[in-house]
């Protein structure tokens, strides 16, 4: 006889034009006790009878979606269509995983986040807020996408990178390492953002974002240079360097001369590459 850990009860709801049934645990497993009522699934194939995976609260799994291993789907979360959630992942709150998306290996999808299309979210990353991961995008390796940020097309965000606020990452762009994309920044085309780069405000990057450190960290995008905590457009930096504007670091000091050399080097690199 099949070793069942749960059954579908007669309690049902209508969701998305389908009938879903509340589940009931038949034995203790993980944090679930025998007799505990769970969330709703359409059919047994939605939730594996193996491992410690569970659907709880008012969460639902339907269509040909599959939840397996040690996954927890809880609160009002929805997993549907052909989506797969596996490993030790958590889908919670009002999050939605749909289409052919895959969530795995300790990933967390929470709040009102959406993972759709053929997107892949894995390896301890966190998708939260109203973030959207769609198309063939990949988010992995401790990365975080939050707030109203979106990652789409075949873009990749990984290795501790953070995309937040209203930032957009699209096309074949790659954001990795400890890079941060925030505010209304747009990373697109073949852009590559890595290291400790900070791209923010209304900056746009369509190619490799250059970052290096000389006194302060400098990050250069298509239209801005951020040096330390100050971000200006390229032309604004030129005007600043050619002016007598008084700043905290006096212009006749060795420190300012080092700053000026760094900025002029960055501007020269930008001018040499702007049409490439």
Image (cartoon, rainbow, N blue to C red):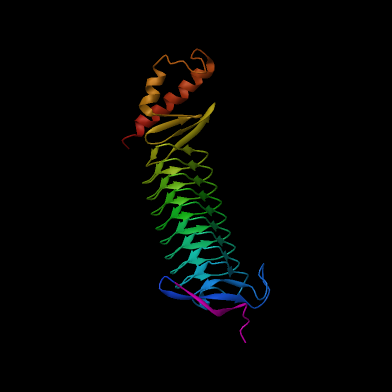
Q: Residue visible at 57% across and 75% down?
A: 23
| Residue 142 placement (x, y as % from top left) | 56, 51
Q: Is residue 45 left or right of residue 134?
A: right
Q: Residue visible at 53% across and 66% down?
A: 59
The span shown in magenta is 1-14
Image: 173 above or below 203: below
Q: Nearer the viewer, residue 206 or 100?
A: 100
**View extreme (bottom): residue:** 1
- The quadrant of the rendering that contains the C terminus is top left
Image: 267 above or below 201: above
| Residue 99 placement (x, y as % from top left) | 42, 65
Specify whether residue 239 is in view.
yes
Image: 125 above or below 71: above
Q: Nearer the viewer, residue 18 or 240?
A: 18
Q: Residue visible at 60% across and 76% down?
A: 24
Image: 93 above or below 42: above
Q: Is residue 64 left or right of residue 29?
A: left
40 falls in the magenta region: no
- The quadrant of the rendering that contains the N terminus is bottom right
Residue 47: quarter of image: bottom right
| Residue 34 placement (x, y as % from top left) | 67, 75
Specify whether residue 214 is in view.
no
């Amino acid at each position: 006889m099949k070793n069942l850990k749960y059954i579908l009860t007669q309690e049902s709801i209508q969701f998305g034009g389908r009938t879903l049934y509340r589940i009931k645990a038949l034995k203790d497993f993980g944090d679930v006790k025998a007799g505990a009522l769970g969330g709703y699934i359409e059919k047994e194939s939605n939730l594996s009878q193996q491992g410690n995976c569970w659907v709880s609260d008012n969460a639902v799994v339907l269509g040909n979606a599959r939840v397996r291993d040690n996954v927890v789907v809880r609160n009002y979360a929805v997993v549907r269509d052909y989506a797969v959630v596996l490993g030790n992942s958590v889908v919670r709150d009002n999050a939605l995983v749909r289409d052919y998306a895959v969530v795995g290996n300790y990933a967390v999808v929470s709040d009102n986040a959406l993972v759709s299309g053929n997107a892949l979210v894995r390896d301890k990353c966190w998708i939260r807020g109203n973030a959207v991961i769609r198309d063939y995008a990949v988010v992995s390796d401790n990365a975080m996408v939050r707030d109203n940020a979106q990652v789409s097309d075949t873009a990749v965000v990984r290795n501790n990178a953070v995309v937040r606020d209203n930032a957009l990452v699209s096309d074949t762009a790659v954001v990795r390492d400890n890079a941060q994309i925030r505010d209304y920044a747009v990373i697109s085309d073949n852009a590559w953002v890595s290291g400790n780069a900070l791209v923010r405000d209304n900056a746009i990057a369509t190619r490799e974002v250059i970052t290096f450190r000389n006194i302060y960290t400098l990050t250069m995008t298509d239209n801005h240079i951020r040096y330390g905590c100050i971000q200006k457009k390229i032309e604004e930096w030129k005007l600043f360097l050619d002016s007598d504007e008084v700043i905290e670091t006096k212009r006749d000091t060795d420190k300012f001369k080092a700053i000026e050399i760094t900025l002029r080097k960055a501007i020269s690199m930008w001018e040499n590459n702007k049409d490439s």
